[in-house]
Image: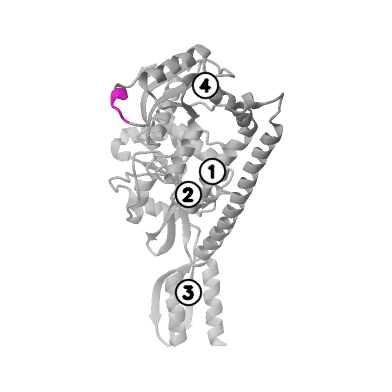
Amino acid sequence: MKISTEQKSGTENRVILVKRTAPNSDSEREENLYMELRELTRAAGYLPIAEVTQTRFPDSRYQLGRGKIEELAELVRSTGAEKVIFYNKLSTTQLFNISEICGCQVIDKFQLILEIFAKRATTHRSKLQVELARLKYEVPRARAVVSLLKKEERSGFMGLGDYEDSYEQDLKKRIARIGSELESAEKDDESLRVFRHRKGFSLICLAGYTNAGKSTLFNAIVDESVEAKDMLFTTLVPMTRALDLGGRKALLTDTVGFIEDLPHWLVDAFKSTLDEIFLSDLILLVVDASEKPEMILQKLSTSHDTLWDRIQGVPIITVLNKTDRLDESELDAIMENIGHMAPNPVFISAKKGDGMTALKAEIIKHLPAWAFCSLSLPNSEKGMSILSWLYEEGIVRKVEYGKRIVVDYEARTEIINRAQTLIKAQEN
């Protein structure tokens, strides 16, 4: 048990953090997970004033042992903590039992993530996604919630059955309504995606474990100033900007970060946001290279698990960020440990702007291939109109004016086919 020296500061939203550790688990990995809980707590606006840990297998009633829960309750009373936050996933029964003994609100890591998402949701869609995630989290617990809260009012065994059914059905109806609204938004997204491809844009997404520096890289590579804090889940609403790649037109999107053990109901709720990654032409998988190799491998594994079954062969560039904190020998050692999990690695420091040229070169190398051709246009007003269109849709490498306009041109195959069709139409 550890108590912070800040416990008497009078700061609001004071909480106690709790984690049960399985026997024989890796102590360093468990500490890293606890550190993640601390960072999530800070991102939600709470002040951790004490920490409680126990090594044991889970207790079905309290997660921890009964004696440790009573110690926790005494700690709540002595520190004036307003909430207890468990790293471990808690069942409805465990939540109820622990809160009854501690006399305060008790939540687990996944409810904490939902709180963060709710605070960061600024658009109508992101608010719908958060609400959908909350409802999907609640449905499996619906009957237990009603039974526990109303247990003293029951006239007999399962006497609340009708009420429980009604509550559960109400949740499912709200899920269906929100799901329908988000499906409509997904269709709009797909139409926008098709339009952008038709206009010659390649779609690139930033992905990676939360707090790897995606937003800082986004700012550095597109010369923007989106919020980039040293905090988990800074980005919740995807942001897209044009990316200059020496004539190739591309759009770069910054997306929500991954985190270990993201439950399926949260992934499902944010499907339309994650589709920005899954349906892109290229993924920049950002990694914090300043962390220990074991932690980098774990976070890469989490990212790959989230991506691999959905991206259907989309190329990945592994962007090893924060290299300003390391020397060359340390970078070599890291690559020896993680190279098998880091396709197409590029070293950068987004904060200092180092490595941007090399990153852009690697991006161009992995973008969908463009074809090269020579086009002959009529030297007329209509020919000049086609030439103007060619500049908008691809890269004009060379133009020679004579009896005809000869253009050395590079673009997607469908753009070249469209150009040849326009030229034939003008000459018939």
Pointer 3: what residue?
374
Q: Nearer the viewer, mark 4 or mark 1?
A: 4
Q: Position of residue 263 (x, y in %)?
A: 55, 36
Q: As drawn, is 67 to the left or to the right of 292?
A: right
Pointer 2: what residue?
283
Give 168 or 355, whichever is nearer the viewer. 168
**Proximity of marks 2 and 1: CB atoms separated by less than 8 Å:** yes
Q: Which residues are magenta?
A: 6-11
Secondary structure state at the residue bearing disc 1: helix
Q: Amino acid at mark 2?
A: Ile
Residue 103 visible in the snapshot: yes
Q: Nearer the viewer, mark 4 or mark 3?
A: 4
**For the residue carrying disc 1, how many other residues have a C-alpha within 10 Å: few (<14), some (14-19), or many (20+)?**
some
Q: Amino acid at mark 1?
A: Leu
- Does the stretch in magenta take in 340? no
Give 149 or 287, whichever is nearer the viewer. 149
Secondary structure state at the residue bearing disc 2: strand
Disc marking residue 100: 4
The residues bearing labels 4 and 3 have C-alpha atoms spaced at a distance of 77 Å
Pointer 1: what residue?
307
Q: Amino acid at mark 4?
A: Glu
The mark that comes first in sequence, 4 or 2, is 4
Give 242 or 357, whichever is nearer the viewer. 242
Total numbered circles: 4
Q: As drawn, is 191 to the left or to the right of 333?
A: right
Q: Nearer the viewer, mark 3 or mark 1?
A: 1
